[in-house]
Image: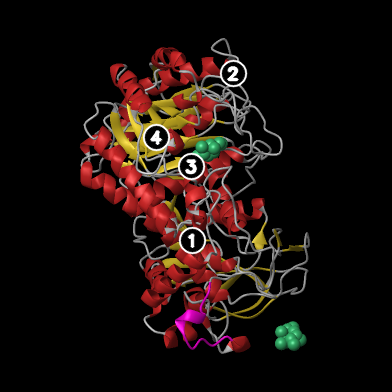
């Protein structure tokens, strides 16, 4: 099966696409032929062109200059390299900001943000919306039938720098959005709880964005603002997409996401595009950056419903925007790239083809470094291109997983609103801790919305789902009743979608499912830890819990609540619901999740027994399975400095050698085994 064989749109690029952002306008034209020749050498099959070309494509309003782009497109077509053509709307030119100064974004504090960097536009600006759709339309008409055109790349990283604008135009559009959401002011007043602090509105004209206030602004106003800002950027995307779709209905359209990016709800965005694409950059200083990479890749696959997706950008080596920009170690590029492929990417692309000579990103690595082709980076890039060709048959297969983590952007926005019990409850910390424990157990994760169909999963993790609707809570309850194993963390089920507390004791929405009643939170001091009776350890949070049907798994030995329950479990129907009232440390989380996986019949790295020993030390080898029509592929990615042998039978595709019973993977290496039919059946 290939992705193009499914009913989704996929660019006409064979196998696993390989390439990057190509910015020929930054170079004299006589270099382009060399670019194309070297792309051929590296095995590049697709490049993204024009992302920041607006100023050159439209020198004056409504007058376009496509000459240089025509020549680039023709060169690429002749070399059989597909183009992911950008609509070039990510950075309005200076003439535009000069002519439409009201299109420049305004910060919460009321400061105008100027052109001179990039992304200096208000998402609600009518001038911007008109100019960007006009440019998209002009590009679509110009290149609709061009043989190089493989797909459309709308804008770039929506919200990356300008996720919100507090200007008067935005305020008016926000009011319109609120009218649609609430219908009338009474419902808005009720939802926002405006009886509090004399905030009652008598006219929509009085409603404004959550601009700088003397003290905490209305939380629901802030929450709705985040919803609005995500929707407003989506409206920018949809406006351009519709223009493109009208001209080239058969071509796939994407915009590049940024993984766990807070301002934009990718679950609600993804259904509006044909292919999910993502930009992922590791943080060099983070020793767990390879785990974060896997998490981001799993999230991006998940928002796209498990379909193959495009890794649109990563770096070949250093970036330019971290405090200290570490070069990648030898072999890291291959491991990182194939981690993405293992987790469902059918394209591996980079920012950017040729490292820039000028501008703010000149110290950002490229596929072709400043030092040229006699470089480690170039050799690793060309080797990667060759490796991806060997994996062509993997394209279109899908990742297997029987464990999910609930992920919800509105819950993220809400849990991090201010004036909460503890500033140490940060959504990503909780999700990452849960993900990381599963990662060390070598369990592949899907991310799911709280209202998703969960029937495919044996275990579901619910990290701090502070905001939850009653229907989503009912969905999670049904999941457990039907035999699911659920593990829920503290500060979940606290408020409804309007940020109003579910009453009667915490965790309101999940009280019955979990069989507990919490009357008071006891957050801990920074760095304070508590000991649990089972030897585990926690931090950040504790709470005064009384079981109401749940069994106590372990209790607190010390801290504010010695003797009180720390972890509980309740048998519900055919399933089990666990509740964890503190931020367990990594070994304690692993132990808990190992036990739950064991009970639920999920295979983990550790022996299939209930005995358990921390495996963090031994971990570092990922195995992920992608399954297509009639074939399954086992990816083994060895992040350790030791060679390993992993059970597998079939053919190792990167080396073309048979694997009998096991595959040998060098320290820091990768193996991809097309599994023999018997192994697949097992
Ligand atoms: C002050 C204010 C009250 C309330 C409390 C909260 O005392 O007067 O309205 O906000 O702080 O601690
Ligand atoms: C983002 C942008 C690119 C480039 C890279 C640098 O991903 O989309 O244009 O700025 O960051 O890492």
- Marks 4 and 1, the one that precedes in the sequence: 4
Q: Residue at x 51, y 46 (%)?
A: 295
Residue 652 seen from this side: no
Q: Which mark is residue 57?
A: 4
Label 2 CB, ligand 2: below 8 Å?
Answer: no
Query: Quarter of the image containing the C terminus?
Result: top left
Q: Residues within 10 Å of mark 1 (few under 14, many from 20)?
A: many
List the residue tagged with mark 3: 93
Q: Which of the pair 339/12 is nearer the observer?
A: 12
List the residue tagged with mark 1: 409
* Front of the two marks 4 and 1: 4
* Front of the two marks 4 and 2: 4
List the residue tagged with mark 2: 370
Element type where label 2 sits in the image: loop
Q: Is residue 298 above or below residue 473?
A: above
Q: Which residues are magenta?
A: 199-208
What's the CA distance linking mark 4 and mark 1? 36 Å
Label 3 CB, ligand 2: below 8 Å?
Answer: no
Query: Quarter of the image containing the N terminus?
Result: top left
Q: Residues within 10 Å of mark 4 (few under 14, many from 20)?
A: many
Element type where label 3 sits in the image: loop
Q: Which mark is residue 453?
A: none
* Front of the two marks 3 and 1: 3
What's the CA distance linking mark 4 and mark 3? 10 Å
Colour mode?
secondary structure
Based on the picture, tell me whether residue 205 belongs to the magenta stretch.
yes
Q: Which of the pair 428/394 is nearer the observer?
A: 428
- Marks 2 and 1, the one that precedes in the sequence: 2
- Marks 4 and 2, the one that precedes in the sequence: 4
Task: Give the image quarter of residue 18.
Answer: top left
């Amino acid at each position: 099966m290939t992705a193009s064989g499914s009913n989704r749109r996929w660019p006409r690029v064979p196998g696993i696409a390989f390439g990057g952002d190509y910015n020929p306008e930054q170079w004299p034209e006589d270099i382009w032929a060399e670019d194309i020749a070297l792309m051929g050498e590296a095995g590049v099959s697709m490049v993204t062109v024009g992302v920041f070309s607006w100023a050159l494509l439209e020198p004056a309003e409504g007058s376009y200059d496509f000459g240089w782009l025509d020549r680039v497109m023709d060169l690429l077509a002749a070399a059989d390299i597909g183009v992911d053509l950008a609509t070039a709307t990510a950075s309005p030119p200076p003439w535009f900001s000069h002519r439409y100064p009201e299109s420049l974004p305004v910060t919460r504090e009321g400061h105008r943000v100027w052109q001179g960097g990039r992304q200096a536009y208000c998402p609600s600006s009518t001038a911007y919306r008109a100019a960007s759709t006009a440019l998209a339309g002009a590009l679509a008409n110009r290149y609709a039938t061009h043989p190089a055109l493989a797909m459309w790349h709308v804008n770039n990283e929506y919200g990356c720098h300008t996720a919100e604008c507090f200007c008067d135009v935005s305020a008016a559009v926000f009011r319109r959005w609120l009218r649609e959401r609430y219908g009338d002011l009474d419902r808005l007043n009720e939802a926002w709880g405006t009886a509090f602090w004399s905030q009652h509105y008598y006219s929509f004209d009085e409603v404004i964005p959550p601009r700088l206030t003397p003290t905490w602004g209305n939380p629901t106003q802030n929450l709705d603002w985040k919803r609005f800002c995500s929707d407003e950027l989506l409206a920018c995307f949809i406006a351009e997409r519709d223009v493109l779709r009208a001209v080239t209905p058969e071509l796939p359209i994407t915009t590049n996401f940024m993984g766990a990016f807070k301002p934009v709800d990718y679950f609600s965005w993804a259904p509006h595009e044909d292919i999910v694409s993502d930009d992922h950059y590791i943080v060099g200083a983070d020793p767990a950056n390879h785990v974060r990479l896997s998490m981001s890749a799993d999230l991006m696959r998940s928002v796209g419903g498990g379909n193959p997706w495009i890794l649109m950008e990563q770096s070949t080596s250093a970036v330019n925007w971290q405090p200290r920009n570490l070069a990648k170690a030898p072999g890291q590029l291959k491991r990182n790239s194939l981690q993405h492929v293992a987790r469902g990417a059918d394209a591996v692309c980079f920012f950017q083809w040729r490292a820039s000579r000028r501008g703010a990103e000149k110290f950002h690595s490229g596929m072709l470094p400043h030092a040229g082709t006699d470089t480690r980076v170039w050799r690793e890039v060309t080797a990667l291109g060759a490796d991806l060709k060997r994996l062509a048959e993997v394209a279109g297969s899908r990742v297997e997983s029987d464990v999910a983590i609930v992920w919800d952007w509105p819950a993220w926005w809400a849990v991090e609103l201010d004036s909460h019990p503890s500033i140490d409850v940060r959504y990503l910390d909780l999700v990452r801790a849960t993900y990381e424990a599963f990662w060390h157990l070598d369990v592949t994760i899907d991310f799911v919305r709280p209202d998703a169909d969960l029937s495919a999963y044996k275990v579901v993790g619910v990290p701090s789902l502070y905001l939850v609707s009653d229907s989503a809570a009912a969905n999670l309850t049904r999941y457990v009743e039907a035999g699911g194993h659920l593990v829920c963390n503290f500060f979940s089920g606290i408020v409804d979608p309007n940020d109003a507390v579910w009453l009667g004791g915490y965790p309101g929405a999940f009280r019955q499912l979990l069989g507990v009643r919490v009357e008071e939170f006891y957050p801990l001091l920074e760095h304070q830890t508590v000991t649990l009776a089972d030897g585990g350890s926690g931090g950040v949070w504790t709470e005064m819990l009384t079981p109401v049907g749940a069994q106590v798994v372990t209790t607190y030995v010390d801290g504010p609540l010695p003797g009180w329950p720390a972890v509980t479990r309740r048998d519900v129907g055919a399933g089990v619901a666990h509740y964890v009232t503190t931020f367990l440390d990594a070994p304690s989380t692993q132990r808990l999740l190992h036990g739950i996986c064991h009970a639920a019949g999920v295979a983990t790295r550790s022996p299939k027994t209930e005995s358990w020993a921390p495996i963090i030390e031994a971990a570092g080898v990922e195995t992920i399975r992608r399954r297509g029509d009639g074939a399954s592929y086992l990816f083994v990615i060895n992040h350790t400095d030791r060679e390993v042998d992993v059970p597998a039978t079939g053919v190792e595709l990167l080396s073309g050698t048979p694997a009998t019973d096991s595959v040998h993977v060098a320290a820091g290496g990768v193996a991809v085994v097309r599994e023999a039919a018997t192994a697949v059946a097992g």
